[in-house]
Amino acid sequence: MAGYHLLYPMRTYLIVSGKGEETNVMAADWVSVISFNPFMVGVAISPKRTTWGLIKKYGEFVISVPSLDMLKDVWTAGTKHGPEKLKEMSITLVPSKKVGTPSIKEALANIECKVVDARDYGDHTWFVGEVVAYSYDEKAFPDGKPDVGKAKFLAHASWTDFVTFDKKIYRTE
Ligand SMILES: Cc1cc2nc3c(=O)[nH]c(=O)nc-3n(C[C@H](O)[C@H](O)[C@H](O)COP(=O)(O)O)c2cc1C
């Protein structure tokens, strides 16, 4: 068993990179918020990914938040390589607000990032992105909070196995 599985289940995201004909999408679990103000996020991406070269080339990426309904496309994004895979996917690319890399219309949210740092740790590069804009589906985030019972946020349990969240909320006060 690989030790990193001890940190699972983790949420799964889609990383959009490139633009125009070069637009590519990959799945990524290793994503984190790293600063509140300014809002910054990080994602660990292996240099083996086509996405890695595109983020290096354009200095920007979009983190798209998929729902369970997008699982088939998430799996394609996470197992195939390069922009050709988009022909097998049913996502709709739409212009982002502040970066040239497109957003995904069907996603629950799209977080637009400009790379401010990229550092290698072992076999992955930790790309730090400053969030320059975002858009989201108001039905998935009514009153600015995730509707976990309805939006079917996607999480990854182990290689082929994914889960979503229960409606039950455990409130602390
Ligand atoms: C659910 C899931 C999560 C993944 N998470 C990551 C990740 O966080 N970082 C990474 O480098 N690769 C991750 N991968 C692997 C890439 O998504 C995969 O190698 C993909 O085919 C790369 O596509 P590309 O070559 O078009 O960039 C993940 C794959 C899956 C299925």
Image (cartoon, grey):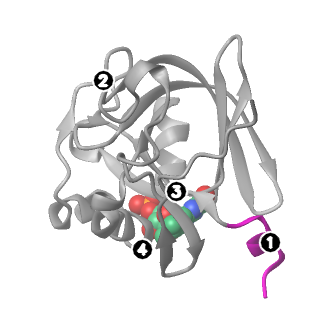
In this view, the residue in front, 144 or 157, is 144
Numbered disc 3: secondary structure: loop
Alpha-carbon distance for marks 1 and 4?
22 Å
The quarter of the displayed image where residue 89 is located: bottom left
- Three-letter code for the amino acid on which mark 1 is drawn: Leu
Q: Mark 1 highlights which residue?
A: 6
Horizontal placement of 22 versus 170: left or right?
left
Q: Mark 3 highlights which residue?
A: 12
- The quarter in which the C terminus is drawn is top right
Q: Residues within 10 Å of mark 3 (few under 14, many from 20)?
A: many
Numbered disc 1: secondary structure: helix
- Three-letter code for the amino acid on which mark 2 is drawn: Ser
**Residue 46 screen position, x and y as percent:** 63, 59
Q: Compared with residue 101, is residue 151 higher up or lower down, i.e. above or below? A: below
Residue 96, numbered circle: 2
Q: Compared with residue 128, is residue 14 higher up or lower down, i.e. above or below? A: below
Alpha-carbon distance for marks 1 and 3?
16 Å
Q: Nearer the viewer, mark 2 or mark 1?
A: 1
Q: Is mark 2 within 8 Å of ligand 1?
A: no
Report if residue 5 lies within the magenta region. yes
